Image (spheres, rainbow, N blue to C red):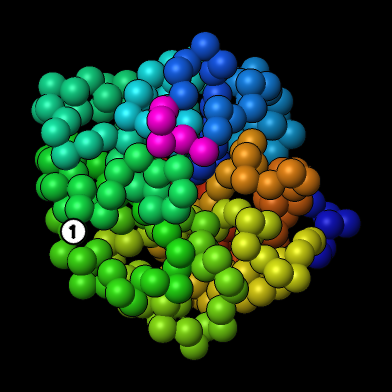
Amino acid sequence: MPNAQPLTAPANSCDCHIHIYDPTKPVAPTAAGPGPAWANVGAYRAVQQRLGTTRAVVVQSTAYGLDNSCAVEAIAELGLSQTRGVAVVGADVSEAELQRLTDAGMRGARFQMLPGGALPWEALEPVAAKIAAFGWHIQLQMDGRLLAERETQLKRLPGTLVIDHVGKFLEPVPVEHPGFRTLLRLLDGGKTWLKLAAAYETSKVGGPLYGDVGALAKAAVKAHPERMIWASNWPHVSVKDLPDDRSLLDLLLDWAPDARIRQRILVDNPAEVYGF
């Protein structure tokens, strides 16, 4: 890791996946837990200062199920001009509610298909059909090893798709794996984006380079740099040993050595996905 010269974030760099928690909000029955009370807007502003990022995407936490109020309030507090969000909405969501959430900065609907998620696979296509008119995307987190089983379904979604966490292969796989080849084909289609984030969650070799996940990240960046976005995944609720956010940003020096490509990943691509 070339940490001797840390990455300098370009102007308007965006952290495309963070969570904010509020201990006054009720925890959903589907949630794995309440989340850390210290992970508030003030704490995240300190992270932004350290990283040199100014834009952020607040992703609805599984802690709150379909109650998006914590994320909406966080977007407002961080500033709508520099912040967007990803909500969780069911198939019965009204157009009025989607408009309200759009006005509040929401630009996507989250599907967490791992423990703690609020919605089943059966809701994916109905939700995708409803949000398409509002220009939202589907944000999907699942075990990437199963992507081949979902390829046909994902390709027929009417709008765009953002896949979380370098595909979130719960057991890191080689680039020849059918799930990763499916991921590349989805990127080929021009409607899918990949979030370069959370290598620490699934890597078996560990930091600082997370080489097993890094190999997939580098292959994806090489194939489609115009489809990559980056995120810290702060506050890292899935692990006990919190990674260093600065080091996670510096991973882009290894995954995307070309400064022009890093500009796309940190600034230009997020601006297109989230409407900055």
Q: Is residue 31 magenta?
A: yes
- Viewer-side residue, 227 vs 231: 231
Q: Image height check: is 158 above or below 93?
A: below
Q: Quadrant of the N terminus?
A: bottom right
- Viewer-side residue, 73 vs 236: 236
Circle 1: element type: loop
Image coordinates of residue 36 in percent, x first then y, are: 64, 27
How many numbered circles does the render carry?
Answer: 1
Q: Is residue 117 magenta?
A: no
Residue extending farthest right: 4
Q: Image height check: is 269 above or below 233?
A: below
Q: Is residue 180 left or right of residue 51?
A: left
Q: Image height check: is 60 above or below 171?
A: above
Seen at 55% across and 28% down, the residue is 34
Q: Is residue 52 left or right of residue 63?
A: right
**Magenta region: which residues?**
28-32
Residue density around tag 1, few if under 14, some if 14–19, many if 20 or more, within 10 Å: some
Q: Quadrant of the C terminus?
A: top left
Q: Main secondary structure of the magenta part?
A: loop
Seen at 76% across and 64% down, the residue is 206
Query: Mark 1: which amino acid?
Result: Leu
Seen at 22% across and 36% down, the residue is 90
Seen at 51% across and 62% down, the residue is 168
Residue extending farthest bottom: 176
Residue extending farthest front: 29
Q: For mark 1, what is the residue?
A: 157
